[in-house]
Image: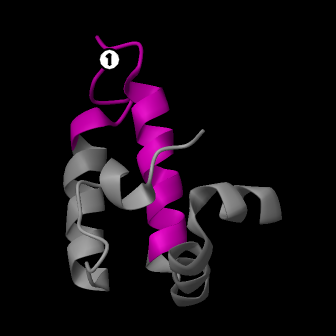
């Protein structure tokens, strides 16, 4: 089962778009596969964070995620 997207980005579910953007950029920079060449799991963490950003940054997808959670959202994709 996937982790909660807010948890992935280290945010509260009440976070606004500005907070989501800042958290994603900070975390993505830290674990980007081109930057963190030593860590074999960096790419996996980066992809998880990018997926969370993709959903939470889109108003429609974010609202659907907030209503249904990650399991229901993943099934609908």
Mark 1: which secondary structure?
loop
* Image: magenta residue range: 30-56
Q: How many marks?
A: 1
Q: Nearer the viewer, residue 1 or 61?
A: 1
Task: Examine the structure image and report whether residue 46 is included in the region drawn in magenta.
Answer: yes
Residue 77 is at least partly visible in this image: no
**Quadrant location, the C terminus:** bottom right
The image quadrant of residue 41 is: top left
Coordinates of residue 69 in the picture (x, y in percent): 56, 65
Helix, strand or loop for the magenta stretch, by majority = helix
Residue 26 versus residue 32 in the image, above or below: below
What residue is shown at x 61% (from left), y 80% (from top)? 64
Q: Nearer the viewer, residue 70 or 52?
A: 70
The image quadrant of residue 17 is: bottom left
Coordinates of residue 52 in the picture (x, y in percent): 47, 58
Residue 38 versus residue 25 in the image, above or below: above
What residue is shown at x 46% (from left), y 29% (from top)? 43
Task: Examine the structure image and report whether residue 69 is included in the region drawn in magenta.
Answer: no
Is 71 displayed left or right of 26 in the figure? Answer: right
What residue is shown at x 47% (from left), y 53% (from top)? 50
Coordinates of residue 51 in the picture (x, y in percent): 53, 54
Q: Which residue is mark 1?
A: 37
Q: Nearer the viewer, residue 71 or 43?
A: 71
Q: Nearer the viewer, residue 24 or 9?
A: 9
């Amino acid at each position: 089962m996937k982790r909660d997207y807010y948890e992935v980005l280290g945010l509260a579910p009440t976070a606004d778009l500005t907070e989501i953007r800042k958290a994603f950029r900070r975390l993505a920079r830290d674990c980007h596969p081109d930057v963190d060449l030593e860590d074999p799991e960096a790419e996996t963490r980066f992809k998880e964070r990018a997926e969370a950003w993709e959903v939470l940054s889109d108003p429609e997808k974010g609202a659907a995620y907030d209503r249904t959670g990650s399991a229901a959202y993943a099934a609908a994709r």
